[in-house]
Image (cartoon, rainbow, N blue to C red):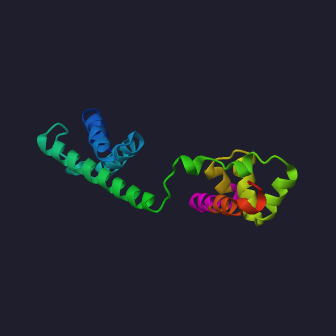
Amino acid sequence: MEQSQSLKLQKLYELYEQPMYRIAYAVLHDAELAEDAVHDAFVRLVSRLGKIDEPDSPRTKGYIVKVIKSTSISIYRRNKRKYLFEQPIDDDTMKVPDTITNVESDAMRRSLLNGMNSTERRIVSLRCEYGLSWKEVAEKTGLNEGAVRKRFERIKQKLRNSRGEIYDET
């Protein structure tokens, strides 16, 4: 990039970085995504620096607003699709069931674990015994994070359903 283009980019950044961030944040409602949007918008602007006249002209300002809005909306749509397929994380999802964490005897614990396949046992062990995050459990098991969460939910449900068989709660 030649000297004048570099100076033009610097001037654009000085003038528009904060307003661009505010526009992106208004669309995305997330500080990190807004920062990403500003970065992506500047990457787009670098390839079009030759078409931008004066950095402080109304025409340039209009163009900058158009670029940051479209960039922010693209990020919003991309993330919206991504999160459509994820399970919501609520308090129930984050709670570890008592039947796994507070098992009173080793025999009872072995009984619970013997009813699971090796992948299920590994997920339960990594999550409950070692306290790993969902991401870390996913990395250790070679599954994606969503699959680990879903399997854990199924394990919890299986334990709830079999609870009457394991415990004599009467």
Between 161 and 72, the one lying in front of the other is 161
Taking the magenta stretch, the answer to whether it contains residue 3 is no
- Residue 44, position in %: x, y? 31, 52
Above or below, 132 against 157 in this view is above
Taking the magenta stretch, the answer to whether it contains residue 151 is yes
At 56% across and 50% down in the image, what residue appears? 92
At 13% across and 45% down in the image, what residue appears? 59
Residue 13 in sight from this viewpoint? no
Q: In which image quadrant can residue 31 be found?
A: top left
Type of secondary structure dominating the magenta stretch: helix
At 38% across and 57% down in the image, what residue appears? 80
Q: Is residue 41 left or right of residue 112?
A: left
- Residue 50, position in %: x, y? 23, 50
Between 18 and 146, the one lying in front of the other is 146
Q: Is residue 35 left or right of residue 49?
A: right
Residue 14 in sight from this viewpoint? yes
At 73% across and 63% down in the image, what residue appears? 119
Furthest-top residue in this view: 14
Q: In which image quadrant can residue 110 be found?
A: bottom right
- Residue 90, position in %: x, y? 51, 49
The residue stretch that appears in magenta: 140-153
| Quadrant occupied by the C terminus | bottom right
